[in-house]
Image: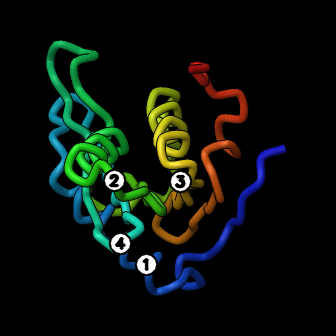
């Protein structure tokens, strides 16, 4: 069973609202000329640093990259010793407004989030936000219970 909380946007904490706003701001800068599906992600590190990422499309599909992976890879490259605390993800509609629908990370992004949890032995809160609704998961294990783990 998938475990999550469903909240109205006005009922999330101020810190979570700030992270969601960073995801929205980042989505507005996405490079999505082919799909016009602009996704934004914002990662908060344990030290409070917030890193934004957005999807980057490419005519040579699948050379593009999702917002979640852009943000996580930048965080892990720039702050390799600081765990990720939480990630917020949102999408803008074709008019530039926050979507009415919540979107979830794709399988590749779920696996990267799982690997980041494994890397730091630390659960990552996942915040998926639409215009009015927010879904919160305590760990990627709730979205990807049988993720790939390479035994060392």
Residue at point 37%, 44% (across, down)? 68
Query: Which dot, 4 or 1, sits closer to the camera?
Result: 4
Of the residues tagged 2 and 3, which is closer to the observer? Answer: 2
User: Which residue was labeled with disc 2?
Assistant: 81
Depth check: 101 or 46 in front? Answer: 46
Kindly identify which numbered label has been placed on residue 17. 1
Residue drawn where x is 49% and y is 59% of the image: 100
**Label 4, label 1: how far apart the Cα atoms are:** 18 Å
Question: The C terminus is located in which quarter?
Answer: top right
Tag 4 residue: 47
Q: Secondary structure at mark 4?
A: loop
Q: Which mark is residue 135?
A: none
Q: Earlier in the sequence, mark 1 or mark 3?
A: 1
In space, the residues marked 2 and 3 are separated at their CA atoms by 31 Å
| Circle 4 Cα neighbour tier, 10 Å, few/some/many (<14 / 14–19 / ≥20) | few
Q: Which residue is mark 3?
A: 102
Work out whether residue 83 or residue 37 is closer to the camera in this orientation and state it: 83
Horizontal arrangement in the rendering, residue 16 relative to residue 66 (left or right): right
């Amino acid at each position: 069973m998938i475990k999550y909380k469903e909240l109205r946007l006005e009922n999330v904490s101020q810190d979570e609202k700030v992270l969601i706003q960073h995801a929205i701001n980042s989505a507005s800068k996405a490079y999505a000329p082919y799909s016009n599906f602009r996704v934004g992600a914002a990662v908060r590190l344990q030290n409070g640093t917030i890193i934004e990422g957005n999807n980057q499309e490419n005519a040579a599909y699948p050379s593009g990259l999702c917002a979640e992976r852009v943000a996580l890879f930048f965080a892990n490259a720039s702050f390799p010793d600081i765990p990720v605390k939480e990630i917020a993800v949102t999408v803008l509609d074709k008019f530039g407004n926050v979507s009415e629908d919540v979107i979830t990370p794709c399988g590749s992004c779920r696996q990267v989030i799982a690997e980041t949890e494994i890397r730091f032995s630390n659960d990552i809160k996942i915040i998926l936000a639409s215009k009015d609704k927010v879904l919160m998961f305590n760990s990627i294990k709730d979205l990807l219970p049988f993720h790939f783990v390479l035994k060392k």
